[in-house]
């Protein structure tokens, strides 16, 4: 939530900042702003309500020269989205400007104190209190900006990633972090800063991830300096980030979401590479090998996650319980962290997160860790906070996901969970070599089957156009495909703003059946696996009440084709891998309905991709 970016060095800062903001816009897009120190050492702030493109238009007639700057794209927490609440925020004297990602929990009391001392606030954000507090310490005798920032941050309760400019010290940017991500890019005589590496990667692959309560001084002509809140020096750990810039572009697709849907066959290949041999006879997950004893002797597994990752977790539970016979609980991270859970050193807690930054998931990890549990992360964003907070983990390797509605990360998570379940089952000797090879061979076929399925894009687009009238949808599935129904409904809600409910099909008669009328579209996932006959009965129950059935079935299924109003055939696979196939047409259905309705698919209203506040 909220993206921050900054530059200091020999280039013009403005183009770096604007391009960086566009890369980070998936984190929030209520308003955007930037601050520059120009060549006369004047500090200028520009802000606009709306997207980064609105900011560009609003500053187009101004002189934006300068080689030091910071910029921000906002997802509103405190204060409505408007120009006054957009970042950067000036201090009272306008000699400081600050951008912030996070929440200052004690802002109200700090604000009251500062107002009593005559500080004038111009916004209703929690952030403004930070810049005023830093100015207060500067005015009260702090020897420089760094000291003032250290003193201010000692007063603060909450989460922050900040960057501060001071026109009296124009050749430096001070940055700091606690519980919100911040990465520094190291160029030749230049520094970049950002919420993640995507704005940095085209300039340098050398980065330093800042840790909690660390402050970095990015100064022209000097080496990176990192200290803590008490001015103790900290050694910077440089890392090399590997990212393909092509993955950050739309590559000819109209939206990132569609591109990422189409990326899935390749992503799933990347996800399996080096983990399953080409013959499909062996599976190896390094974290399972390294921590075999801990994992196999666990009393139970608990999976914590949010949103789409939580849906993947439900599939993971099925996979692990079926193949490994280890009990698995799935919890929303936000509920787990406040539920005083029974968790301890006999448990293994898995945390699933695309971004690796979700605040609730991070807090759930910290709680479980503090009670002695072993923590295993399943993440996409390399080097993000969750992989750094866990004892071990497996990346899903699907590349940066930019569209706010998660697509390829979901199938990547499910793939890693399948590999994890099979690796554990193998180590536990719970699965025969014959069954293992049968499943692995099917898994290796999934990318090609996904490609075949993507050829139905036009068919699904035509189907979607029929349903733009609907204001409600029901999605039904059973077993492995019940979480697919939940995920399909979530996709539709997120990007088309149509209300949609996912349900286990048999539960329909305990409530949702009352909603069915001639207008109600009901998406049914009824592959020729598992509880096919039961699904058939559920479809009959819907048709008896004249609901509109859109069925996703296994190819060659003439029975459901006769009954359903609309029918899309899917390549056949085995039951436990059905989610990898069945989720793709549901992503396309949601995508095309949203496009038909003229919605902003990549940046749906009110949402953000990386939820770094609770
Ligand atoms: C937000 C995103 C979702 C995502 C969820 C969890 O709500 O919009 O797409 O599933 O956060 O995020 P994570 O990065 O932890 O998977």
Image (cartoon, helix red, strand yellow):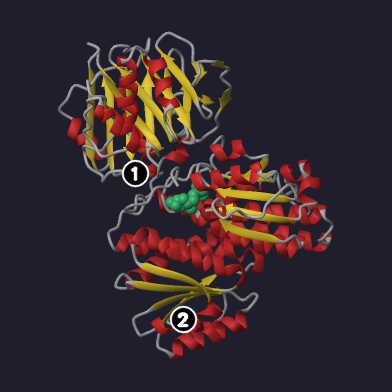
Report x, y in % for residue 539. Answer: 50, 84
Q: Which residue is mark 2?
A: 511
User: Who's the residue at 50% across and 56% down the image?
Assistant: 308
Secondary structure, mark 2, is: loop
Q: N-terminal of the two: label 1 or label 2?
A: 1
Report x, y in % for residue 41. Answer: 25, 12
Up-down: is 85 above or below 334?
Answer: above
- Quadrant location of the N terminus? top left
In the rendered image, the residue lying farthest to the bottom is: 544
Q: Which mark is residue 547?
A: none
Residue closer to the observer: 19 or 208: 208
In the rendered image, the residue lying farthest to the left is: 61
Residue 571 appears anywhere in the view: no
User: Who's the residue at 23% across and 32% down the image?
Assistant: 121
Up-down: is 153 above or below 28?
Answer: above
Alpha-carbon span between mark 1 and mark 2: 36 Å
Residue closer to the observer: 9 or 306: 306
Secondary structure, mark 1, is: loop
User: Who's the residue at 48% across and 32% down the image?
Assistant: 178
Q: How many marks?
A: 2
Residue 558 appears anywhere in the view: yes
Q: Which residue is mark 1?
A: 75
Q: Are marks 1 and 2 in contact (CB under 8 Å)?
A: no
Report x, y in % for residue 587. Answer: 45, 61
User: Who's the residue at 53% across and 65% down the image?
Assistant: 484
- Left/right placement of residue 485 relative to residue 464 reads right
Question: Alpha-carbon neighbours of circle 1 within 10 Å: few (<14), some, or many (≥20)?
Answer: many
């Amino acid at each position: 939530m909220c993206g921050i970016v900054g530059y200091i060095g020999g280039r013009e800062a403005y183009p770096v900042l604007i391009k960086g903001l566009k890369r980070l816009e998936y984190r929030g897009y209520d308003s955007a702003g930037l601050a520059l120190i120009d060549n006369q050492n004047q500090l200028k702030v520009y802000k606009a309500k709306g997207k980064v493109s609105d900011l560009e238009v609003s500053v187009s007639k101004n002189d934006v020269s300068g080689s030091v700057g910071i910029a921000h794209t906002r997802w509103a927490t405190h204060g409505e989205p408007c120009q006054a609440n957009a970042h950067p925020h000036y201090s009272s004297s306008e000699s400081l400007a600050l951008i912030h990602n996070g929440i200052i929990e004690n802002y109200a009391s700090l604000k009251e104190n500062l107002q009593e001392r005559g500080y004038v606030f111009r916004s209703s954000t929690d952030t403004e209190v930070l810049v005023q507090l830093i100015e207060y310490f500067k005015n009260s005798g702090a020897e420089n900006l760094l000291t003032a920032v250290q003193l201010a941050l000692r007063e603060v309760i909450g989460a922050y990633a900040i960057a501060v400019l001071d026109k009296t010290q124009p050749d430096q940017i001070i940055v700091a972090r606690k519980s919100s991500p911040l990465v520094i890019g190291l160029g030749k005589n230049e520094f970049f800063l950002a919420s993640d590496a995507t704005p940095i990667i085209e300039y340098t692959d050398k980065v330093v991830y800042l840790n909690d309560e660390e402050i970095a001084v990015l100064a022209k002509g000097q080496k990176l300096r990192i200290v803590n809140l008490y001015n103790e020096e900290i050694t910077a750990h440089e890392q090399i980030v590997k990212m393909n810039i092509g993955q950050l572009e739309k590559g000819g697709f109209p939206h990132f979401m569609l591109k990422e849907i189409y990326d899935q066959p390749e992503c799933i290949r990347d996800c399996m590479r080096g983990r399953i041999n080409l013959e499909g006879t062996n599976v190896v997950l390094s974290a399972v090998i390294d921590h075999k004893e801990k994992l196999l002797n666990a009393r139970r597994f608990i999976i914590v996650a949010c949103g789409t990752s939580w849906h993947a977790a439900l599939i993971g539970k099925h996979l692990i319980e079926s193949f490994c016979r280890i009990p698995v609980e799935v919890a929303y991270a936000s509920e787990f962290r406040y539920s005083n859970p029974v968790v301890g050193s006999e448990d293994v807690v898995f945390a699933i997160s695309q971004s690796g930054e979700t605040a609730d998931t991070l807090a759930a990890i910290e709680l479980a860790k503090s009670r002695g549990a072993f923590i295993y992360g399943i993440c996409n964003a390399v080097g993000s906070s969750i992989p750094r907070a866990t004892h071990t983990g497996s990346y899903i390797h699907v590349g940066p996901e930019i569209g706010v509605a998660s697509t390829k990360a979901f199938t990547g998570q499910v793939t890693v969970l399948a590999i994890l379940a099979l690796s554990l089952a193998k180590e536990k000797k719970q699965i025969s070599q014959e069954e293992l090879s049968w499943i692995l061979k099917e898994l290796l076929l999934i990318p090609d089957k996904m490609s075949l399925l993507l050829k139905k894009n036009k068919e699904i687009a035509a189907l979607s156009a029929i349903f733009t009238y609907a204001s409600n949808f029901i999605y039904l599935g059973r077993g492995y495909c019940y979480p697919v129904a939940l995920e399909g409904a979530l996709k539709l809600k997120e990007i088309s703003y149509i209300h949609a409910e996912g349900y286990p099909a048999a539960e329909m008669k305990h409530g949702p059946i009352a909603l069915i009328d001639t207008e109600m579209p009901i998406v049914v996932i009824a592959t020729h696996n598992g509880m096919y006959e039961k699904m058939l009965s559920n479809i009959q129950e819907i048709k008896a009440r004249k609901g509109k059935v859109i069925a996703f079935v296994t190819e060659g299924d003439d029975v459901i084709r006769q009954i359903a109003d609309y029918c899309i055939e899917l390549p056949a696979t085995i039951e436990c891998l059905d989610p990898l196939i069945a989720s793709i047409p549901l992503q396309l259905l949601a995508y095309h309905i949203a496009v038909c309705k003229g919605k902003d698919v990549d940046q749906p209203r009110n949402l953000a991709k990386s939820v770094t506040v609770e």
